[in-house]
Amino acid sequence: MFNKTFWKNALKFGVIAGFVCLVYCFVLDLLGIIPISGKLFPSNIFILIASIFAVKAYRKNNPDETLHFWEGLSVCFITALTASVLVGGGLYLFYSTEHGQMLLSQFVVEAVKEYSMAKQQIVKETNPEYYNSLIAGIKAIDRTSIAFTEVKQRPLIAILPSIMISLYYRRQYVK
């Protein structure tokens, strides 16, 4: 089922997607936008595009250009995981710098200020304990939590699109 180009394609396109996502983060920083939270979500498109190219390249190297659903899904997952590890490591290093620490503290201050302005509404819809845990969670954001969040969330976000990519490029084996 899996051929010798499985790891080659998945890792190659994962590294490419990871570098493109990191470039996107640095461009955001150059534009004065703190590359954290929802600002990074559009970079998932780069991972999905890389997953498409990885599946196409893998399928092209299969005999009769066949592709089983699980092969496509596995290629997509390894591509997304490779990219997320690279992005997580890159953001960890970025937020380890003096400039990154300054941006991170600025983000925390702005987020706490924003949620403080909406405190009455949040407490009204939930409870004071939830609000306090929300503020504590925001204050606990550091470079390690950002890196682990990248590694945990990006592959999970890519699951549904990976299923669709795998189904689209799937071609059954002919016997």
Image (cartoon, helix red, strand yellow):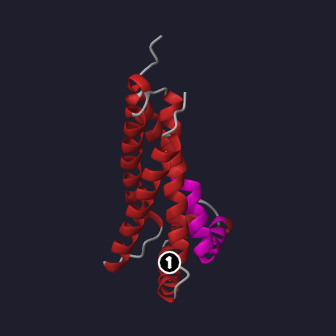
x, y percent for residue 114? 47, 76
Magenta stretch, overall SS: helix
The relative height of residue 25 versus residue 1 in the rendered view (above or below) is below
Count of numbered circles on the image: 1
Residue numbers of the magenta segment: 130-154
x, y percent for residue 67? 45, 27
Q: Nearer the viewer, residue 123 or 49?
A: 49
What amino acid is at disc 1?
Phe
Residue at the image point whose x is 41% and y is 56% from the top: 17
x, y percent for residue 147? 57, 67
Residue at the image point whose x is 51% and y is 63% from the top: 86
Residue 141 visible, this angle: no
Query: Which element is circle 1 on?
Result: helix
The relative height of residue 102 versus residue 135 in the rendered view (above or below) is below
Q: Nearer the viewer, residue 174 or 147?
A: 174
x, y percent for residue 29? 37, 77
Is 98 inside the magenta-drawn segment? Answer: no
Where's the N terminus, which quadrant? top right
Residue at the image point whose x is 49% and y is 82% from the top: 100
Is 137 inside the magenta-drawn segment? Answer: yes
Residue 46: which quarter of the image? bottom left
Residue most extreme to the left: 31
- Left or right of residue 60, residue 155 in this image: right
The residue where tag 1 is placed is 94
- Left or right of residue 31, residue 15 in this image: right
Residue at the image point whose x is 54% and y is 32% from the top: 2
Crowd around label 1: few <14 · some 14–19 · many ≥20 (10 Å): some
Q: Which of 100 and 61 is in front in this view?
A: 61
The relative height of residue 89 versus residue 96 in the rendered view (above or below) is above
